Image (tube, coloured by chain):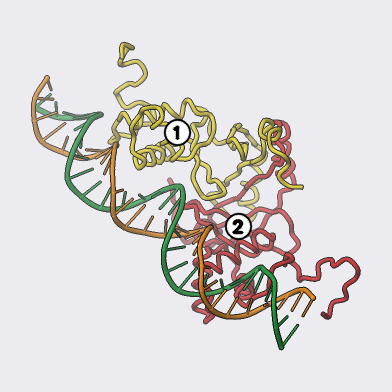
Chain colours: A red, B yellow, C green, D orange
Amino acid sequence: MAAPPTGSDVRSTPIGRASGTRATRQRAAVAELLLSVDDFRSAQQLHDLLRHDGQNVGLATVYRALQAMAAAGDIDVILASNGQSLYRRCGQGTGHHHHLVCRVCGLTIEVDGPAVERWTHKVGVDNGFVDVSHTLDIFGLCRTCAARAPSPLP
Amino acid sequence: MAAPPTGSDVRSTPIGRASGTRATRQRAAVAELLLSVDDFRSAQQLHDLLRHDGQNVGLATVYRALQAMAAAGDIDVILASNGQSLYRRCGQGTGHHHHLVCRVCGLTIEVDGPAVERWTHKVGVDNGFVDVSHTLDIFGLCRTCAARAPSPLP
DNA sequence: AAGATAATGACAATCATTCTCGATAATGGT
DNA sequence: ACCATTATCGAGAATGATTGTCATTATCTT
């Protein structure tokens, strides 16, 4: 044991590691892969990428790793309109935030909206709700995709 | 049935009926059921309600009816966190709006946020996006459910 | 080093939703 | 009204993402 046990054993585990969890090759592979990907990807896409990368990780393991990371707040999850979950690393340290996502290429920009946070919370409280949370995502066509595609609707 | 048979449904393509679509008992049943339900319900819940009501409608038909109504803009759809779609009639005439939904009982309140609309649009445009849209839903525990359940998180 | 036990992987199971296709019934024209 | 057309229905099979099972393996604690 190298780390000095200073009385109460506060967080002798690395950031994002809950006590009782273990560092494995598979989880490291998933975490590292996410560092090299900028856009939201499904669990299965990430699994394929690992395979092509020579990494051999089971699909169920990828799901478990992503869930764990999401629960720990290390990655963002959004629900695509077809119901599948998409994952992406999020800016370290930045807490709650939202996403501006290109419908075509998936380009993602993190955005903050303190006013919106306040507003949604107030709406909940004003209506007698507690434990208020919200989902907010912005979609559109990024400059590149807009230039490429003709106007979709007249 | 002694009630006037041609009371509520006009045969000459009522509002919301695209040409080429037909008015059937099943779709009427789904539409009417939605009138009596205030909260978001899954397709399967609605199917069960129809069954208990004596109405015999196939599950696939309920899905098809809901999809058609959603596509026509007659009902609202939200994606629950488990990925399943929830449906609810929306206030006639009211255009774009958002929802405050109780996580436990599904109680739903429609809310408007003109400022949020402006903000999301601005965020998109400022980043070079066009054709900007967004999703925004607020979740929480309504007064009743909060009183019933102990605080979920210490 | 050794034991306790998270974590893994291959595969089965689940669950919402969609598809298939023969049967049925709503519409429009006559 | 009657009929032909064809949208819609219903029951079950199929799909596809995600989760559960469980024997085996690898990590952490002592």
What residue is disc 1 on? B74
The secondary element bearing badge 1 is classed as loop
Q: Chain of mark 1?
A: B
Answer whether residue B93 is visible to the viewer in this image: no
Residue B82 screen position, x and y as percent: 54, 50
Q: Nearer the viewer, residue B26 or A119?
A: B26
Local SS, label 2: strand
Check the image and report above or below for D8 versus A85: above
Identify residue type, mark 1: Asp
Tell me: B11 left or right of A148. left
**Quadrant where the C terminus of chain A is found in the figure:** top left
Count of numbered marks: 2
Q: At 50% across and 41% down in the image, what residue appears? A: B86
Rendered location of residue C22, percent (x, y): 17, 45
Q: Residue furthest right?
A: A7
Q: What label sits on residue A77 in the rendered view?
A: 2
| Image position, residue B18 (x, y; %) | 34, 34
